[in-house]
Amino acid sequence: MAEDVTAVAKPSGWMRARRVARDVTFTTSASGVAALCSILALALNARSLGPGNFGTLAVIQAYVAFVSGLCTFESWQLVIRLCARSPLRLGPAASCGIALDVSAALLATVLAIGGILLFGEAVGVSRDNRLLAIIYSLTLLASLSGTPKGVLRLNGRYHVIAGNQLMQGLPWWLPLSSFGSSMPHCRIM
C-alpha cells in the first residue's frame, strides 16, 4: 500500500527534445538578431563617420577585440564541467569563475591601454586618437559574462542568455549613429 513518494518523474525523450529545440531556437535567434543589429550599426556608422573616422573606429575596435581575445577565458565551461554532476560545487566554482573573469577583464584593460600608449602608432592609432582608444579600452571592464553565462546554462535559463545577447546588440547602434551624424566635425567615434 505504501507508495514511493521519493520517485521523481523524469521527462520523456519527447519533452527533452522539445526543451533542447526551444533552447537552441532562443540562442540562435538572439545571435541572429544581434548580428543584424551589428550590421545595421556598421552601416550607420560608416555612413555618418566617413571613411577616415570610420577607419579609425575599425582599427580601435579590432585592436580591443584582439586584446580581449587574448585575455578572456571561457570560464562558463569551467562552471558547467565542475557542476554538471555535483551541484554542491556551484558555489566554489562560481566564486573561482568570477575571480577569473574579473582578473581577465582587469588584465585585458591594462594591456590594451598600455599597448595603446606604448605601441599606438605601430597599431595604427595616431596620437590624436589615443584618448579615444583608451576610452574604448575601458569597455573591457564590462566583459564579465563568462561565469554568469555558465550558471544560467547549467540551470537551463537559455532565454535569459538570449535576452542578454539581444540587449548587447540593440542599444549600441542608435546613439553612435545619431551622435556621429549630428556632429560631423567632432573626432569622436
Image (cartoon, helix red, strand yellow):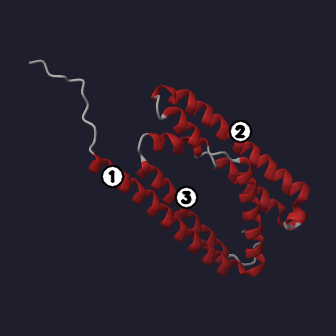
Within-10-Å neighbours for mark 2: few <14, some 14–19, many 20+:
some
Q: Which residue is mark 2?
A: 103
Residues under labels 3 and 2: Cα distance? Answer: 22 Å
Q: Are marks 1 and 2 in contact (CB under 8 Å)?
A: no
In the displayed structure image, the side of residue 18 where residue 124 appears, left or right:
right
- Residue bearing the label numbered 3: 168
The answer to which of 185 and 96 lies nearer the viewer is: 96
* Residue 67 higher or lower than 50, as above or below: above
Instruction: Kindly identify the residue that appears in the image at 40 percent across and 60 percent down.
Output: 25
Q: Which is more foreground, mark 1 or mark 3?
A: 1
State the residue in front, 97 or 10. Answer: 10
Q: CA distance from mark 1 to mark 2?
A: 38 Å
Give left or right: position of 137 versus 95. right
Q: Are marks 3 and 2 in contact (CB under 8 Å)?
A: no
Q: Quadrant of the N terminus?
A: top left
Asked whether 151 or 187 is in front, the reply is 151
Disc nearer the start of the sequence (1/2): 1
**Is 16 positioned to the left or the right of 1 in the image?**
right
Q: Viewer-nearest of labels 1 and 2?
A: 1
Looking at the picture, which amino acid does disc 3 mark? Gln
Residue beneath the point at 87% across and 61% down: 120
Residue 17 tag number: 1
Q: CA distance from mark 1 to mark 3?
A: 29 Å
Residue at x 91% of width, y 55% of height: 118
Label 1 sits on what residue type? Answer: Ala
Q: Earlier in the sequence, mark 3 or mark 2?
A: 2
Task: Tell me where residue 67 appears, x and y as whole percent.
Answer: 76, 54
Compared to 2, does 92 lie above or below?
A: below
111 in relation to 36, above or below: above
Mark 1 burial class by Cα count in 10 Å: few <14, some 14-19, many 20+: few
**The C terminus lies in quadrant:** bottom right
Q: Nearer the viewer, residue 15 or 94?
A: 15
